[in-house]
Amino acid sequence: MRAIRNGVSLLTLSALLLTAAACASDDGGDTPAAGGDASAGASGEIKEGLSVAFLPKQVNNPYFTVSDNGGKAAVEEFKGEYKEVGPSEASASSQVSYLNTLTQQGSDVIAVSANDPNAICGAVKQARQGGAKVVTFDSDTNKDCRDLFVNQVTAQGIAENQVKLISDQIGGAGKIAILSATANATNQNAWIELMKTELKKSEYSKIELVTVAYGNDDDQKSFQETQGLLSSYPDLKGIISPTTVGVAAAARYLSGSQYKGKVVLTGLGTPNQMREFVKDGTVKNFALWNPADLGYLAAYAGAALASGIITGKEGEKFTAGKLGEYTIGPDSVVVLGPPTVFDASNIDQFDF
Amino acid sequence: MPEQTTNDTPVLTLAGARKSFGAVHALLDGRLELRAGEVHGLVGENGAGKSTLVKVLAGVHAPDEGVLALGGQPTVLGGPAGARAAGIAVIYQEPTLFPDLSVTENIFMGRQPLRGLRRIDTAAMRRRTRELFAQLGVQIDPDRPARGLSIADQQLVEIAKALSFDARVLVMDEPTAALSGVEVERLFAVVRSLRESGAAILFISHRFDEVFALCDRVTVMRDGRWVSTDPVAELTVGQVVRRMVGREVSQLYPRQDTQVGDAVLRVRGLTRAGVFDAVSFEVRAGEIVALAGLVGAGRSEVVRAVFGVDRYDSGEVLVDGQRLPRGRLAAAMAAGVALVPEDRRQQGLVMELPIERNVTLTRRWSLSRLGLLGPRVEREDAHRWTRLLQVKVGHLSDPVSTLSGGNQQKVVLAKWLSTNPKVLIVDEPTRGIDVGTKAEVHRLMSQLAGEGVAVLMVSSELPEVLGMADRVLVMHEGRLVEEIARDAADEESVMLAATGQAGRS
Amino acid sequence: MTTATKPAQGASPPRARGDVRGARRLFVIRELGIALALVLLVAVTTISNSRFLSAQSRKDLMLGATILVVLAVGQTIVVITRNVDLSVGSVLGLSAFATGKLFLAMPDAPIVLAILAGVGLGVLCGAVNGALIAIARVPALVVTLGTLYVFRGLDYSWAAGQQINAADMPSGFKRMGTAVVLGVPVLALFAVAVLLIAGFYLRSYRSGREMYAIGSDPDAARLSGIPVGWRVFTAMTVSGALAGLAGVLYAARFGTLDAAAGTSIELNVVAAVVVGGVAIFGGSGSVYGAALGAVLLSTMGAALPVLRIDPFWQQAVVGSLILAAIGLDRALTARIARRLRGRRARGA
Amino acid sequence: MVRKRLGTWDVLVVAVLALVVVASSVLVDGFATSRFWGFLLLDVIPIALIALPMTLVIITGEIDLSVASVLGLSSAVMGQLWLSGTPLPLILPLVVLLGVACGAVNGLFVTGFGLPSLAVTIGTLALYRGLSYVVLGDRAVADFPFSWTGTFIEPLPGTTVPWVALVVLGLAVVFGVVLHATPIGRALFAMGNNDQAATFSGISVAKTKFWLFVVTGAVASLAGFFWTMRYASARADNGAGLELAVVAAVLLGGVSIFGGRGTLGGVLAGVLLLITLRNALQLADVPADTLTVVTGTLLIISVVGPNAASMLRDRLRRRRPA
């Protein structure tokens, strides 16, 4: 009896697999990308009805919620269809699964923030073969996979900004540490490298970078790492945390500890998370691009690609709604602009 | 304390109790009447329904039919807690203590004395435990964990538990099975003093001498039914045995004479520290040798070591002159040894698997072709063997648990006889099976011996030992103390040796 | 049977009480062992960096252990009954987020209300687990693995990407997260209270002792009339309630809340309990041991960065600790069993 | 007899799977395409692969929660070996050897020291994952040659079915035959129901379980190799949490968590059901939170279902006069 039953199960399974194989010839549901074949270079209007999908590193992550909403605003402006999908845990493998799904759904534009520069490359390529234009934002993939990368800021810009902010506050001398996210986060590493280069400049010669700690973009871990930094380096003067999760956790730790006001903290953070600490004096200033603008720009860039206004070549120009005109730089990168510095004087003007 | 009852007012009566588990009718007509201040014996063969009756009294099983009355009032126990509330304490064959908890806690679990804020009054609890132990005349540290207590001590803890809630009815299910002579005496003293204080005690035992020495009345059960209840003074052992068995004993043991050949199994100086010591014996082809002794004497442990289930420290086991590697069951099987284990449900069979899988489990490799084992081969083979042993089965694909105890035992036998053994070891071969099947099993063993198989039988049933064996080996506390030839073996000689008194009388 | 029974004759030989004492001592040694490991860890770290024991750092260590201790206490009660609760991390997340939502909706809500709400939510989740285990007779491992997903999923869809910031919390509540009484953080006092109450309950109440009985031998427990299903249900509910409380404490301590709070903390909780000497198959162990285990694990988490040991080692060390702890328990049990049994073969 | 067959859980799972496939084909746009199935099979491969030995392990009454960590450790070690210049054809056997070692450690603790496999593998779950971070830290190694990485997602010519899926299917047949039609399989079921009775029948319970853990480790490391190749990225956190999906799929397929009951066909159906449902819902734009809830609910149903069914059957049987 059991044998028969197994036989039935196996047969059914084989049948299912065969169905899959047999479907090979009729690739239905594969709508060609609207306007995908439009001639390039034409400085025309953005098409209406483009389907734009945002795939953040992780849904439920407040930072991406803000930037995706920026994208949504843009999509509504050019009358496209917006959607946000993504995994609840920040893993590359689930992103691949979502990219596959978007490919099947025939999305015109996919804006993705990569959890791993390589792991999702194959899926991005497949999506492009399926007719989608793929724009990366916040975190890039390898440059030959995607159509365009919308960079929030140049790495150089971040590095200069962060080093300057900390140097001004510690008086140009003393030990500092960096509290980063994860050690394989592409953008973090690029910034840290450039900060090190920046610190070699003569005006920063009295500043010593003692260590880089990793909080894994996890609130509790970042909190503990801050605690560890201050225990390990009693004479630490300042901390740079170029990640929103890290800087908020570090600020919260400092505000409740004896180091408040003695150890300087700056970094990249959101005004809503940092407002309290700026007001209570734990943090004097910090910087960030506007994540909503980042999403907004990514949406427009994707739409421009899908409408054939640009192809991703260096030097091409397109208009991104209220943000104005942008020019594509080397390696098909568009830069949002210099970071905004927030301090007690201007923080209340921002809500994100 | 109930009113001073006369011997005519039963404390507890059970009438027409019936309990079935699926197709197995464990209890068909259970009757019992316990009076205050009496020790009431309950005897019957294994499978006669005694244990089921005990579980009904304990509130574990609700009877399908029948009435339980306490002090004349029909009562529904509704679970173990209800039985305890009604003043019924049960001491099982295997005491059910919590190994991780202290002796004191085991006694008072769920009924701990309380102090303010409903806290447990640990000091009072310990004090009461000391008092109970003093009452019983035992010295057990109230704070030690129950883990590691000897069976005798565990039973004393159980009795202390019963005392602690002033039980009116104390049920003891084969309490002496694993006790030494001294321990039995101590237990009897406790039981007698309980009787004097007015408790009703149900005493279940296989040992007639104990039943006759201790009990006031005896109830006999057979095949799930009540047979008789009489004052012990009006009974003889012979009468009781006939009522239990339902036929003449001699029919049960159809022993045929056989040609005894060379020694097939030789055991030399087998020792396992603390379990058995320097056990040596041999079993010849065509011979049935019984290994007798009290429960706990180390008999099962010896045969398990011989078969390679357990390891041993020193000594050797030879089959046909070839030494078996220690603790290698597969090698023993390859050499032609088979063991029908003591505990059919836990060791003999995989209860949830189909009958056919159980029958062929020992020969899964020899039945396979090119490493593959098809269901048809198994089915045909199982069919052949179950027919040979006259196992009553519905479908071979049914779980073996659906069979009755006797048929289950036949499946175990089939499983091992099919390996064509030279040495067949059977541990309690007829425990818990009905009388008819019992005779069949005995006939089968005789037949095998007749075919030249060396049979080693462990049995706690004296009639079986005396009826079947060519020679009787008697163990006492881990040692082989006596070898008695068939002609010289009788109940007295075996019991004396088993209780360690051989040579002294 | 109130009349005294006469002492029976043939008393058993006197017992060597030393053996029993020795057996009990071995169990105490088990908890002392963790305490010793903890002291050693703190000592080594302090030698390498004296600031590890500064007032600030002491406070941080206590705060760091708080949540794990609360969860470990709940888990201990469950494990003692031979069950396990893997959903605690998700319940914590749900309760932490609920606390944030509560303060968003009612900025003036009293702290007590937040605590009640968190605990209430935990009780609800625990009751779901308990009901599935006790009524549907399904193994706790699988049920709580399932509810680990379910509760977290509910949390995510409720949060929908929202983050609650420290600024949204009333200052009184945040103060509770950092306030110190006599050098001890208020949050840690919660953990101490939970620990003492649970320890007291398990030791001094009938139902508490019955939890041990159930884990020690479930069948025997049923035979002796213990309401096994009900007790297991209670244990799961208590574990849920404590996870709910831990969620509120989490909210007070970290201030920033999203739906991911407490993700995969269950592994650390189980590790703490096992390292603390609670037998994974029930019946023995204490909340104090488990709490020590939790403190050891969280202190290790804090010590590794101070010792400048690559934090990547942390998880590997946790794994090794679990294996060492269960191996040690096994060896100890075997040794005690040998000691207690040793007499029987000789005597009686 | 017929009713008995229809009432069996694994047949039910196959039926539900068929239902999901039919319903999704009608309701979900893009479901009934070969591309969907191609993608789906790639997602199925690692889970199905690990589920094969896991089925056997759970049938013997044990569990191995460390599989995903072995996958991650294999991936991390691959990355480190590649960085140190080891060629891929040599890495593959080395990684499998690593899996064998990991499995042997589990097996030794469980069978040698007699410790509960649940506790042991929770310990090694943390240990192996920790070691993979020690080996590779937070780095990602991604410069594997495309000639290898591309090969592993290559479909069979003329279809979208990845050839690796056929390899897994082949392995599934092997595992299925071993479990259901060999002496070894009989022994596994016997020890899962009652290891004492199995011992008394001449089955070397400890030895068999030890080797089962070894096989599980080896297969998990193979899955790690595939994972690394498919995503072209060796990372310490690869496959984190995958053990839950595997256990969920195995239980969903009708294997009893207490051991002794289950079929490999049922497990394959369980894996397919889990992934198909997930991907179909994903295609229908159901958010990730709901998917999480669905997975958890399925897992609970998979254990409550058979229990409730058998309780119901018992009640019916009792009601019928004997």
Image (spheres, coloured by chain):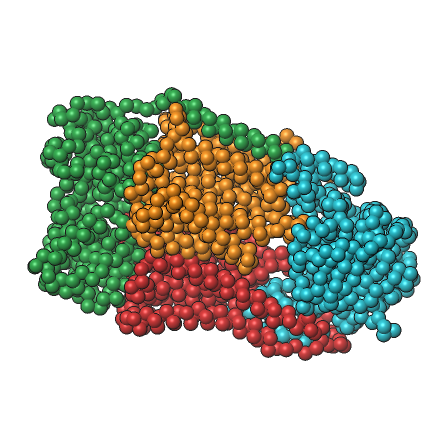
Chain colours: A green, B cyan, C red, D orange
Q: Residue A78, relative to residue A240: is it above or below?
A: above
Q: Position of residue A65 (x, y in %)?
A: 26, 42
The vertical placement of D198 against D26, above or below, is below
**Residue C226 drawn at (x, y percent):** 60, 58
Instruction: Locate residue A230, reporting x and y percent.
Output: 24, 65
Residue beneath the point at 34% across and 38% down: D149
Q: Is residue A264 above or below residue D190?
A: below
For the residue pair C304 and C105, the one nearer the viewer reads as C304
Left or right of A261: which side holds C246?
right
Relative placement, left or right, of C155 versus C218 is left
Quarter of the picture containing the C terminus of chain B is: bottom right
Q: Nearer the viewer, residue C334 or B256?
A: B256
Q: Residue furthest top?
A: A26
Can residue D98 be spotted in the picture? yes
Residue at image x 33%, y 33%?
Answer: A100
Name the quarter where the N terminus of chain B is drawn.
bottom right
